[in-house]
Image (cartoon, rainbow, N blue to C red):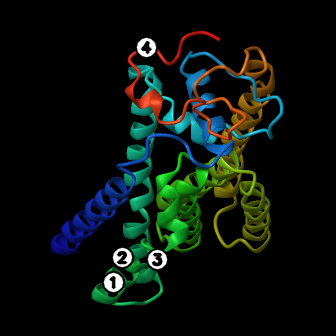
């Protein structure tokens, strides 16, 4: 058992290292305006300057919250962008151990589960978007973790374990909603599951109440944070480094910013 635990850690490190290595040459956001919007949102949450994104769609606050700490330590856009991609790498690589756990619950033996999980973590849906500062980099991990915790809620024999799984699955469902609009589908499906569990007594009804309370926290937090984005972003001109330029490059001056020594976060 200990050996397989070490192998899972090693597999996770290899997956994270591969993702970090493939994104090493990225110096500017390529998927605009999505990457630019998430990066600016994180900068605003860290107390930095806003930019004018009133022309764009409304982006959820979940992913920017994850990468906000980067902007506590640097104001250089290239350094911050690299750091965000380094955050993506280990989070996305968690698909490997989670995939292993899912395969084991489906009845595969340990070697087969390990192999399937390693290959699954390399599929484009869980690998490609690690190279971008976008919610898609972490979303597959959230969905798989949510499915596993819902399963644990229904199958864990101990009462304490069921309460933990119910609360954990609720928080993950709410986080999925806070990260991307697709999370609304997960929340609605989760509500249906909760109703079915309560109606058919598939788990103690008090766990359903605990899950409902836990779900309300990230959902209400997401609504509160996202509601302030348009006012904050529209309060400044679009001269900040990650605002949209006519050429479509969110840095405005392309890779030349990588060599610039001036403060890239000067007020607009």
- Kindly indicate whether the residue at mark 1 contacts the one at mark 3 (C-beta within 8 angstroms): no
Q: Where is residue 165 drawn, in percent x and y? A: 53, 59
Per the image, label 4 sits on a secondary structure element best described as: loop
Per the image, label 1 sits on a secondary structure element best described as: helix
Q: Residue at x 58, y 68 (%)?
A: 147
Instruction: For label 3, count other residues whose C-alpha is less than 10 Å away and answer few (under 14), some (14-19) or many (20+).
Output: some
Look at the image and tell me whether residue 139 can be seen.
yes
Marker disc for residue 102:
3
Per the image, label 2 sits on a secondary structure element best described as: helix
Per the image, label 3 sits on a secondary structure element best described as: helix
- Kindly indicate whether the residue at mark 2 contacts the one at mark 1 (C-beta within 8 angstroms): yes
Q: Quadrant of residue 12?
A: bottom left
Q: Earlier in the sequence, mark 4 or mark 1?
A: 1
Q: Which residue matches tag 2? A: 118
Q: Nearer the viewer, mark 2 or mark 3?
A: 2
Q: Earlier in the sequence, mark 2 or mark 4?
A: 2
Q: Is residue 232 above or below residue 20?
A: above
Q: Residue furthest right?
A: 55
Left or right for 7, reference 157:
left
Q: Quadrant of residue 98?
A: bottom left
Q: Which residue matches tag 1? A: 115
Marker disc for residue 262:
4
Look at the image and tell me whether residue 138 can be seen.
no
Q: Where is residue 204 drawn, in percent x and y? A: 64, 63
């Amino acid at each position: 058992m200990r050996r397989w635990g070490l192998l899972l850690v090693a597999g996770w490190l290899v997956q994270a290292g591969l993702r970090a290595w493939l994104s090493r040459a990225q110096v500017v956001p390529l998927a605009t305006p999505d990457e630019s919007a998430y990066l600016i949102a994180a900068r605003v949450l860290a107390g930095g300057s806003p930019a004018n994104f009133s022309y764009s769609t409304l982006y959820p606050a979940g992913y920017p919250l994850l990468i906000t700490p980067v902007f506590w330590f640097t104001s250089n856009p290239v350094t911050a962008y690299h750091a965000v991609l380094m955050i993506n790498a280990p989070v996305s690589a968690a698909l490997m151990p989670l995939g292993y756990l899912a395969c084991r619950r489906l009845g595969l033996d340990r070697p087969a589960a390990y192999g399937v999980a390693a290959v699954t973590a390399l599929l484009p849906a869980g690998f490609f978007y690690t190279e971008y500062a976008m919610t898609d980099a972490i979303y597959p991990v959230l969905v798989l973790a949510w499915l596993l915790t819902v399963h644990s809620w229904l199958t864990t024999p101990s009462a304490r374990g069921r309460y933990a799984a119910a609360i954990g699955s609720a928080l993950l469902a709410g986080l999925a909603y806070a990260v991307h609009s697709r999370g609304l589908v997960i929340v609605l499906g989760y509500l249906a599951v909760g109703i079915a569990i309560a109606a058919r007594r598939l788990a103690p009804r008090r766990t359903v109440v605990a899950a409902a309370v836990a779900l309300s926290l990230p959902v209400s937090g997401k609504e509160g944070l996202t509601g302030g984005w348009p006012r904050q972003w529209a309060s400044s001109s679009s001269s900040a480094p990650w605002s949209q330029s006519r050429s479509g490059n969110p840095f405005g001056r392309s890779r030349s910013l990588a060599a610039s020594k001036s403060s890239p976060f000067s007020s607009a």
